[in-house]
Image (tube, rainbow, N blue to C red):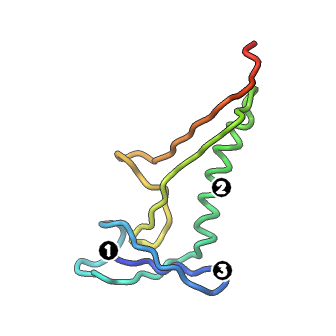
Amino acid sequence: MPLVKMPLNDGGELLIEAADGQGAIPAGGTGRVVQASETVQRAMGSIRSAAEAVLGELRAMDQPPSKINVQFGIKVTGEANLAVAKSAGEANFNVSIEWTGVDPS
């Protein structure tokens, strides 16, 4: 699998193993390192925005849940981007919500 080198805001770097068969990695590119075009922090900012959107909508309910749990997988593609991981061809978001002590009326 190719490695993706993602820069950090502090000047460091993070090496991440990319998902197989993704992006424009040439055949026979085993052990190849691809330079990401954005920092880890910038890529994670997009993911944070998605999580905040989900949480914001659930918190805006007439009876907001007492507990919200949002999970999604993240993968690094051969194009050196972060993306929400797919499961069975669909975006993989798992959301569980819980109400405790809610008046049933």
Reply above or below: 19 against 97.
Answer: below
What residue did someone put label 2 on? 49
Q: Is residue 52 above or below residue 41?
A: above
The residue that mark 1 highlights is 1
Estimate the x, y position of residue 102 in percent, counting from the top left: 74, 23
Question: Where does the N terminus fall, quadrant-wise?
Answer: bottom left
Dots 1 and 2: beta carbons under 8 Å?
no
Gap in angstroms between the C-alphas marked 1 and 2: 29 Å
Kind of residue sitting beneath label 2? Ser
Number of numbered discs on residues: 3
Outermost residue to the bottom = 11
Question: Please, what secondary structure does the residue beneath circle 3 have?
Answer: loop
Q: Earlier in the sequence, mark 1 or mark 3?
A: 1
- For image coordinates 59% across by 85% down, the residue present is 12
Residue that numbered label 3 is attached to: 9
Q: 10 Å neighbourhood of mark 3: few (<14), some, or many (≥20)? A: few
Residue 30 on image: x %, y %: 27, 81
